[in-house]
Image: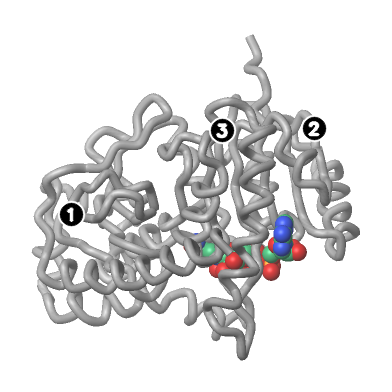
Amino acid sequence: MAKDPVRVLVTGAAGQIGYALVPMIARGVMLGADQPVILHMLDIPPAAEALNGVKMELVDAAFPLLKGVVATTDAVEACTGVNIAVMVGGFPRKEGMERKDVMSKNVSIYKSQASALEKHAAANCKVLVVANPANTNALILKEFAPSIPEKNITCLTRLDHNRALGQISERLNVQVSDVKNVIIWGNHSSTQYPDVTHATVNTPAGEKPVRELVADDKWLNEEFIAVVQQRGAAIIKARKLSSALSAASSACDHIRDWVLGTPEGTWVSMGVYSDGSYNVPSGLIYSFPVTCKNGEWCIVQGENTSDRYHFSLVNEFYVMLTRLSYISRTLHR
Ligand code: NAX
């Protein structure tokens, strides 16, 4: 028997990532080749015509799994009945803008979208925040949608995770599908800490640690980390546009693993609500290694972490606490 369609919201759907993401969802990349979907696409009035153009192309592509499209500039209409919400729309940081200016714009955007989701989304709606600053926007959404369970609000660090897998695969000249269990700790930003301590490669002689195969700690501790941290900037330099197809693909990976589960023995990185694991203060949205089963993520426990990671953690706390204090002041104004 055919499955009931799942309603998937994409905000900022007329933008670059939205344009790459919606066909992937309509093709079953996010939820599986047997899962029909209804796409809800939200953008702002100046982008309404472009949004309608995206809808026209979705119709023209005749995706068999696509059972309907809602294209709107109304947040309530967009959020009504959605089971999954991918929050890509937001206010980007522009030249000359201070971080606090971007944050105050995003506080008002995420405030109205959070309350529309809280009131009108389906029960147990899963939320993925992509728009930057992703950890902070997820935190704002959580503050303004207190009835959405904390476990249902996440942010995207899977792109960083996939970038780390890609760099190891290039360096060792192995298939990326044979590399697993890297970790992205912290924020989706240049302060993240990509960690290969437990990463392995599947070889004809069995699973081998990445560190042993690379056999170059200097490269792993310096260049590898810098390349992953700065990859977004390198893409902008090359394309004159920020990452879009890799971001869209990683958003599909994030939701697919969350909903359908991670393969046995494999973890992925997700920005999730901290429960205090690894001494990360509860309440921060922080990237951890997680496994997923039955639609729930669970932080992988007990991985030893390096000194460099602890150093990065201190930086993260500083950044997040500054942001929390700013959000709290904005909220109470
Ligand atoms: P674009 O500027 O191409 O698209 C953004 C879209 O959002 C536009 O169509 C715009 O009209 C819309 N928008 C603005 N305000 C909105 C609102 N209030 N409600 C609904 N839609 C709204 O940016 P794009 O390249 O698609 O990037 C989108 C976001 O993803 C940015 O914030 C970007 O920084 C972030 N990224 C996050 C990544 C991650 O790994 N977490 C990586 C890729 C990307 O840089």
Is residue 284 shown above or below 219?
above
Residue 71 visible, this angle: yes
Q: Which is more toward the observer, 172 or 70?
A: 70
The secondary structure type at the circle numbered 2 is strand
How packed mark 1 is, by other alpha carbons closer than 10 Å (few <14, some 14-19, many 20 or more), is few
Which residue is identified by label 3? 125
Numbered-mark total:
3
| 227 or 70, nearer to the observer | 70
Q: Residue furthest bottom?
A: 96
Residue plotted at (76% across, 59% down): 14
Q: What residue appears at the point 47 percent right and 54 percent down from the top-left corner?
A: 139
Q: Quadrant of ligand 1?
A: bottom right
Q: Could you give the CA–CA distance between mark 1 and mark 3, rounded to whole angstroms? A: 28 Å
Q: Amino acid at mark 1?
A: Asn
Q: Which residue is mark 2?
A: 68
Residue 306, by quadrant, is: bottom left
In the displayed structure image, the side of residue 200 where residue 286 appears, left or right = right
- Tell me the residue that label 1 is attached to: 279
Asked if residue 187 lies left or right of residue 87, the reply is left
Mark sitting earlier along the chain (2/1): 2
Q: Toward which corner of the image does residue 187 lie, by quadrant? A: bottom left
Q: CA distance from mark 3 to mark 2?
A: 19 Å
SS state under label 1: helix
The quadrant of the rendering that contains the C terminus is bottom right
Q: Is residue 288 left or right of residue 76?
A: left
